Amino acid sequence: MITRLFIIAVTPAISIALAVYLSDRYDREPISLLFKTFALGALSVIPTAAVETLLIRVNIFPGLLGVAFMAFIVAGLTEEFFKRAVVLKYIYNNRHFNEKLDGIVYAVFSALGFATVENIMYVVFRFSNNPYVGLYRGVLSVPAHAIFGVTMGYYLSLAKFSLNDEEEKLYLRKSLFIPIILHGIFNFILMANIPALASLLIPYVIYLWWTNQKKLNHYINESKKRHDRLNDDDI
């Protein structure tokens, strides 16, 4: 039973990680560095849980304000901050971060490391008696973490390859605050317990997939052009 739940919990993140790895077809990142990013993302659950526990205790807001605090601050801000910290501290200045697509790849791997541990906690331990939790989280929650990672990596790459310090600072701020907003909206829709608002979840998820697929495709095309240009220079 535990083994089956564990497989259900880890399969979505592994599948998405494999898809992202294969999409980086022109200059793939070292497996060891991707594994390290994934592992550090998983370990980021520890400080995230500690900070979230403290923030929950100071949530004195009533009604929907309290829900918004939980969605945008407790979950959105804290989780995106620590997932982003992994990339900033261990990857941002690494020599293998040498094209814009890399920012998305590493940010997604950090996010999926976090999402894997979170999913194990929910599916295997907290809701082991509910067979629908694994399906729901595999379809919505884990992919959502990956989507926020795409947005984060997109702006981290713009920061990394910016032309000046001011531009870099701007995109670094966006790499944190835009994922927080997207994450917060996603959580608020789920947590508000308002039927009319809940009906917006699927359109919102489709919107997230569409916009972030465009970001990913844009950097894949840039990666191909870079690869072709380097090959032409070698001829």
Image (tube, rainbow, N blue to C red):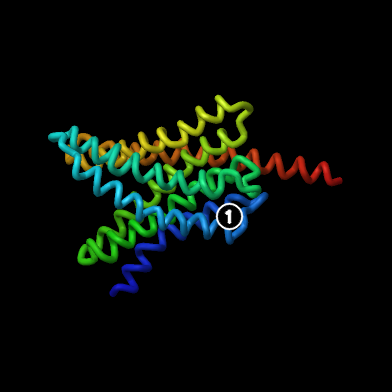
Q: Is residue 149 visible?
A: yes
Q: Can residue 195 be seen in this view?
A: no
The residue type indicated by label 1 comes to Leu
**Residue 155 in the image, given as x and y percentages of width and height:** 51, 35
Image check: 155 left or right of 231?
A: left
Q: Which residue is drawn at the image coordinates 29% and 38% (left, top)?
A: 73
Give the total of numbered labels: 1
**Residue 86 in the image, given as x and y percentages of width and height:** 48, 49
Q: Is mark 1 on a helix, strand or loop?
A: helix
The quarter holding residue 136 reads: bottom left
Crowd tier of the residue under label 1, counting other residues whose Cα lies within 10 Å: few below 14, some 14–19, many 20 or above: few
Q: Where does label 1 land, which residue? A: 22
The quarter holding residue 207 reads: top left
Q: Nearer the viewer, residue 94 or 118?
A: 94
Q: Which residue is drawn at the image coordinates 39% and 40% (left, top)?
A: 206
Please, which residue is most extreme toward the right here? 235
Q: Which residue is drawn at the image coordinates 39% and 58% (left, top)?
A: 116
Q: Which residue is drawn at the image coordinates 56% and 44% (left, top)?
A: 92
